[in-house]
Amino acid sequence: DALSTWGCAVVLIFLFGFKADPGSDGSNSDSEIVTKPKSPGRDADLLIFLGLMLACALVFFQFHSTYPLFLSDHYGLNTFQIGLIYAVNTMMVVVFEMILVDYARRWKLLLTIGWGCFLTCLGFGILPFSSAIWFCVLSMVVLTIGEMLSMPLATGWVSQQSEGGDTGAYMGWYSMTYSVAFIIGPASGGMIYQWSPNLVFHLSTVIGVLVLIGFYLFSRRMQKKQH
């Protein structure tokens, strides 16, 4: 991973170089209005958005904890078969993500993210309702579609919300949200799994519905602010 990242950096620098921001020298023309960067912690819209994404991320990070356990315990899959199920996710992202994200620009952004979060949670939530391998693959397809609709678009929304050149701070808060979810999600999911494996995934569906409702209300809030 480290070598591929450094290799990518070299290619990007070679192709694009370092381009200075025209406004990075601190100079402003008379017509420009200098605004103080807005603190992400005081942006109510951002905090609401991050709260909704946190709830979805708590479910998503079962992907690396209770999800493979359930595939083994409930579906009886071995390590190799579980790897093939994960490969469905990888192949779909590689082949379809950019196409889907480009097409999704025609839809309302916040509602699209909300539906993406719902599908992500639903993909986990339907797992207990069958033990057939085809159903396991179906659940992976559903949650992968949700992942592709929610995460890339959510990143774009956060970057667009920043004002006054504080994009880095906003993206930092967004990244921190996933870091918190990565700590809490697997731990809490694991504790629930010890008590009732099915409950983890039933709760995923409940969270997905609540997040979808939350994004619907949040979308209406943002529309009212624009008008």
Image: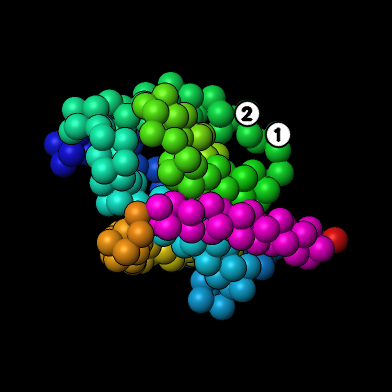
Q: Is residue 206 above or below residue 127?
A: below
Q: Read off the residue under disc 1.
A: 106
Q: Quadrant of the C terminus?
A: bottom right
Confirm or deny contact between disc 1 and disc 2 (CB under 8 A).
yes
- How far apart marks 1 and 2 lie (CA) works out to 6 Å
- In the picture, the disc for residue 141 is none
In front of the other: 10 or 40: 40
Is residue 223 found inside the magenta-colored segment of the image?
A: yes
Which residue bears the numbered disc 2? 103
Majority secondary structure in the magenta region: helix
Q: Callout 1: few (<14), some (14-19), or many (20+) C-alpha neighbours within 10 Å?
A: few
Q: Which residue: 47% across, 40% down? A: 129
Residue in the image at 35% along x and 54% along y: 197
Q: Quadrant of the N terminus?
A: top left
Question: Residue at coordinates 35% horizontally, 59% vertically from top-left?
Answer: 196
Residue 172, visible in the rendered structure: no
Which residue is at the front of the view, 79 or 40?
79
Which residue extends farthest bottom?
Answer: 42
Measured as percent of width and height from the top left, residue 22 is found at: 50, 51
Q: How many marks?
A: 2
Q: Nearer the viewer, residue 121 or 93?
A: 121
Query: For numbered disc 1, what is the local secondary structure?
Result: loop
Residue range in magenta is 198-226
Find residue 216 and report its horizontal and vertical position in percent.
71, 56
Q: Amino acid at mark 1?
A: Arg
